Amino acid sequence: MLAKLSTRPSVRRWAVPGALGLALLGAGLPAAGADEDTGRGLARFYDQRVRWSACEEMDAPKDLQCGKVTVPLDYGRPAAGSLDLALARYRATGPSRGSVLLNFGGPGGSGVDELSAGGKDFLHLTNGYDVVTFDPRGVGRSSPVSCGPGSVRIMEATDGDEGMEDPRETLRQLRRAAAQCAEHSGRVLPHIGTVNAARDLDVMRQALGDDKLNYLGFSYGTRLGAVYAAQFPHRVGRLVLDGVDTLTEPLAEQGAAGARGQQTALENFLDWCVQDIACPFGQDARDARRQVLRLVGSLDEDPVPSAFGEPFTGQDLVGALSQGLYSRQMWPALERAVAQLVESGDSGGLEGFVSGGVGLPVRRAAGGGLTDPEDVPLDNLPAALMAINCADDPDRPSAEQVTRSLGRLRERYEEASPVFGRYRLTQVLMCYGRPRGTDYIRDEVKGVDTPKMLLVGTRGDPATPYRWTQETAARLGPSAVVLDNKGEGHTGYASSECVHRKVDDFLLYGSLPPSGSSCGPEEGRESGG
């Protein structure tokens, strides 16, 4: 849910749902749709068509094609400049009904990279669609944002108990870091956020030649899909939201929900682990929970050296656990990585779960063109995550309000999770010093008048609790059909054969399950065995 900034290069980039961010989007008003937009100076963007070619600048499967679409930098002033957004697709293998657009979550994850690495999960959809994804504005090759040395400043300001003891100094450091993020992110930063990203989706829809948007969004991608449905209800085709994000809860409440969800996921992981003789915490689940707490505390007091020459602390371990618990398919690898640490003091396996990195100067393409893959800054994922989420959130408590509430918040978070509470709480501070975000999502994304859409909620989801699926469905109105996935892990499409089948049936054939129907747990696939 919330991604901790790291000073280490990431070995793999995970899809990290809802979190914190930066920047005020330039045009926060809803869009009525392509027909009216073309009368406001946007015709040249809606008149384009995507040109596809081999993905020559990246190591990608041979049948993956790459392209781009050009969008306005500022929808309120379309003549003020433009941005290119990176696209990738697998072509339909037979008769096609058009395209289905995918967003893998984050926010801040590169869709192009994700489809290149994990496209096999979506190839069944090529029976009826071109399967298309994209790097949203500010992400990956699409004018990537960065905090440069501000990434280190943010981590230092929020890492450890010092920030809790002297919150005013922490807030001063975060304000300085916000200025560095603005300095290193270029002109896209004031125009980042989900309201503009949803408008970009509509330009993509038209450029792909589709009358309606067919869409599959995961985690943060569900927020993007819901905002699109509110902005362009008459352009909604078959829309699926899996791992449903909240549209209304403040970031502090999101953080507490994430701490509770990950504590539950950790306990489920330990229940699973102790059944294996190789579990590094032994064979007693209650004792294993105590051992995790002791290990975190021990590493905070006496870190071990990492492969990058820096100390690997207890909070680094918490960050690795946070990522590794998103899917039961990762549990065997997480167990081995923790055993490696416990048995030999080697943190290398766990470092593979930590996302982020230090931002380096970016060589930006002229005129908003695509950034070369090798020039995407290492901290783009956490920098974009912060940028998008704070652009979407209107709350900006003052320094006095933060200082007064911090002790009470700390108690709530540590009660929610003795392991993840502190880790989550520091992240709640990261929007401080950044422009106020839009009210549009919280106030206006509701009661959508669209065709039926499918919302998938997973009971054991550590990042987007099932109640968010219920609350968002009630907020969106009668168009929302809920599928209850009684499994574990973040999102259901990749972990449940039942969910996978029902989503594909809806996207390919328009066959919707009854609202409130369910999929049972599927131990074989979820366990990674």
Image (cartoon, grey):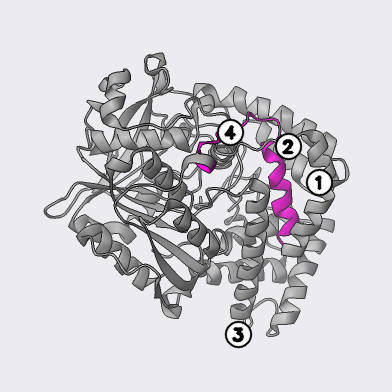
Q: Amino acid at mark 4?
A: Gly
Give residue 351's position: percent from left, percent from top: 62, 55
As drawn, the label of residue 520 is none
* Label 4 residue SS: loop
Q: Is residue 235 above or below residue 44?
A: below
Tag 1 residue: 405
Q: Disc 4 marks which residue? A: 437
In three-dimensional space, the C-alpha distance between marks 1 and 2, rounded to whole angstroms, equals: 10 Å
First along the sequence among labels 1 and 2: 2
Q: Which amino acid type is shown beneath numbered disc 2?
A: Pro
Picture coordinates of residue 15 (x, y %)? 49, 52
Nearer the observer, 148 or 208: 208
What is the spatial separation of the Cα atoms under label 3 and label 1, in whole angstroms?
42 Å
**Disc 4 to disc 3, C-alpha distance:** 47 Å
Q: Which residue is mark 2?
A: 397
Left or right side of 502 for 411? right
Which residue sits furthest right? Answer: 165
Residue 231 can be seen in this image: yes
Q: Position of residue 345 (x, y in %)?
A: 72, 64
Inspect the image, locate mark 1, and give the three-letter code of the amino acid beneath it. Ser
Q: Nearer the viewer, mark 3 or mark 1?
A: 1
Q: Is residue 90 magenta?
A: no
- Tell me where the magenta segment starts and ends, as one range: 419-442
Q: CA distance from mark 2 to mark 4?
A: 12 Å
Classify 231 as above or below 63. above
Identify the element where label 3 is drawn.
Answer: loop
